[in-house]
Image (tube, rainbow, N blue to C red):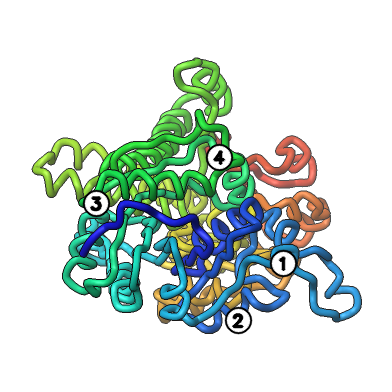
């Protein structure tokens, strides 16, 4: 497998994976590079059909504004919506678009393989999808291709990609492989892509230094709207580990503030005041210092687990144990909050019902992967509590699939069609996801439809707690002693 000394200008870019990272990155790059054709491919025809429809498969603030030229028109008269971008398309023709592409982005799912269902450690990431994509590239490629690895993967994955290509590609094909990790936060991904804090480019294996340099320049040229001081160029190992470390540090901060919240509840300390005290230290800053259920979603836990796995593989057990404590504290926080709620709902009440409002792992996304609501609900139903779930954005089917692992225990779970239906006759309301819609509820009327003790848990402080108390709610606060 040879590398050419020159890399032609990019005319066609192919993204393998039409999920969150692949599709959104391609859309923003297409916005800023109108002379380049961007093709997003995926083996799932339903995902591609959704991207080619008027109802996009991903909810993300700002997405429809950049994607459609007539936001809301289809809702008014039934016409198909005009698209702003003429240089992006979505297809299941993976081999066809690999063949014509100059640059190929790997954006496929890499789920964690847990050591056991109850474990907080992994035995690695499932790279089946990634390896299949690389083999498809090897099979369909002729000439020179630049491969850009964006999928979450273990450190050293670029070397593994290179090995697969060397063993399976045609002699007529040559490759340069780069790392360009994503740093997207769901709920603000479009803003993150348009105004990133940094873009990381990791250069790696090539038999030709000139070829690697040209390929790196070609990738960098796709980000022309980004100030050059925000583009970090490094080796692939540093690029890959830097991405994992970044998410691990965010998870660490969340677990750290949650650990303090437990101490606050056993003393007279106030977690809100402590967060402010800590946040005003310039060496720390204010981000990710709100106590609550803990972190959820597909990224933070998986990246911390990757770090644990890497440390174990390197024989650094003390390092692995340190990061494992971040996961254990996160799980402990969720169980601890469930126990506090149950302490306020004694069995003497008879049938106990809790309304969980919001199921997405955070606001402004419909992603339910690793949502802290899942384990919280499991803890409640396993202790005999009936749970009603309502989320204004997450489809019912998504919630049902996320909870199907409970089997027969799911019989005590109702997925409601409205806040009123979820809260009718309940003893407690858990505001899990702070959707804006929940601020507009007539909470005084809601309280009148509840049963004692009319408990309210609102870790995000989306509602005015003093006002809620006037409405008759018994407010339980994370990080504050309950009187």
Residue 327 appearing in the image: no
Identify the residue at image location x=79%, y=46%.
471
Dot 3 corresponds to which residue?
206
Q: Are marks 4 and 3 in contact (CB under 8 Å)?
A: no
Q: Nearer the viewer, residue 351 or 380?
A: 380
Number of residues whose C-alpha sits closer than 10 Å to that of mark 3, classed few (under 14), some (14–19) or many (20 or more)? many
Q: Nearer the viewer, residue 58 or 159?
A: 159
Q: Up-down: is 428 above or below 45?
A: above
**Disc 4 versus disc 3: nearer the observer:** 3
Residue 41 rendering spot, x and y as whole percentages: 49, 74
N-terminal of the pair, mark 1 or mark 4, is: 4
**Disc 3 versus disc 2: nearer the observer:** 3
Dot 4 corresponds to which residue?
196
Identify the residue at image location x=45%, y=17%.
283
Q: Up-down: is 15 above or below 327?
A: below
Residue 79 appearing in the image: yes
N-terminal of the pair, mark 3 or mark 2, is: 2
Q: Nearer the viewer, residue 266 or 168?
A: 168
Q: Are marks 3 and 2 in contact (CB under 8 Å)?
A: no
Residue 399 rendering spot, x and y as whole percentages: 55, 71
**Disc 1 versus disc 2: nearer the observer:** 2
CA gap between label 1 and label 4 equals 44 Å
CA gap between label 3 and label 2 equals 37 Å
Number of residues whose C-alpha sits closer than 10 Å to that of mark 2, classed few (under 14), some (14–19) or many (20 or more)? some
Would residue 88 be found to the left or right of residue 155 on screen? right
Residue 217: give its label.
Answer: none
Q: Secondary structure at mark 1?
A: loop
Dot 1 corresponds to which residue?
424
Would residue 389 be found to the left or right of residue 182 on screen? right
CA gap between label 2 and label 4 equals 30 Å
Dot 2 corresponds to which residue?
49
CA gap between label 1 and label 3 equals 64 Å
């Amino acid at each position: 497998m040879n590398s050419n000394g020159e890399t032609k200008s990019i005319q066609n870019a192919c993204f393998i994976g039409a999920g969150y990272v692949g599709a959104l990155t391609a859309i923003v790059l297409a916005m800023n590079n109108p002379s380049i054709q961007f093709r997003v491919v995926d083996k799932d025809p339903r995902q591609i059909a959704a991207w080619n429809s008027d109802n996009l498969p991903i909810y993300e603030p700002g997405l429809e504004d950049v994607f459609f030229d007539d936001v809301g028109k289809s809702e008014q008269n039934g016409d198909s919506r005009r698209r702003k971008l003429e240089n992006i398309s979505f297809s299941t023709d993976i081999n066809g678009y690999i063949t014509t592409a100059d640059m190929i982005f790997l954006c496929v799912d890499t789920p964690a393989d847990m050591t056991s269902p109850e474990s907080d450690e992994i035995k690695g990431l499932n790279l089946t999808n990634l390896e299949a994509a690389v083999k498809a590239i090897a099979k369909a490629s002729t000439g020179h291709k630049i491969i850009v690895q964006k999928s979450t993967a273990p450190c050293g994955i670029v070397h593994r990609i290179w090995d697969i290509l060397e063993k399976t590609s045609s002699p007529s094909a040559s490759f340069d492989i780069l790392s360009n990790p994503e740093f997207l936060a769901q709920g603000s991904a479009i803003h993150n892509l348009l105004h990133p804090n940094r873009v990381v480019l990791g250069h790696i294996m090539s038999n030709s230094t000139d070829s690697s340099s040209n390929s790196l320049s070609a990738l960098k040229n796709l980000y022309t709207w980004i100030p050059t001081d925000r583009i970090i160029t490094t080796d692939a190992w540093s690029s890959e580990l830097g991405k994992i470390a970044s998410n691990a540090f965010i998870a660490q901060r969340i677990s750290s503030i949650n650990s303090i919240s437990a101490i606050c509840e056993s003393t007279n300390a106030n977690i809100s005041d402590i967060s402010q005290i800590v946040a005003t230290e310039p060496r720390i800053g204010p981000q990710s210092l709100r106590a609550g259920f803990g972190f959820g979603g597909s990224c933070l836990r998986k990246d911390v687990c990757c770090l644990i796995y890497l440390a174990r593989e390197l024989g650094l057990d003390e390092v692995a144990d340190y990061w494992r404590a971040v996961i254990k504290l996160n799980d402990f926080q969720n169980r601890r909050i469930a126990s506090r709620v149950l302490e306020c709902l004694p069995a003497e009440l008879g049938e106990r019902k809790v309304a969980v409002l919001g199921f997405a792992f955070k606001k402004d996304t419909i992603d339910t992967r690793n949502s802290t609501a899942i384990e919280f609900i499991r803890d409640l139903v396993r202790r005999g509590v009936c749970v009603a779930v309502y989320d204004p954005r997450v489809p019912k089917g998504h919630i049902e699939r996320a909870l199907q692992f409970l089997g027969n225990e799911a019989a005590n779970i109702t997925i409601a069609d409205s806040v009123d239906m979820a809260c009718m006759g309940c003893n407690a309301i858990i505001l899990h996801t702070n959707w804006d819609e929940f601020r507009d509820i007539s909470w005084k009327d809601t309280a009148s439809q509840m049963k004692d003790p009319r408990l309210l848990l609102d870790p995000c402080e989306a509602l005015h707690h003093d006002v809620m108390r006037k409405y008759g709610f018994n407010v339980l606060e994370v990080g504050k002693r309950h009187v």
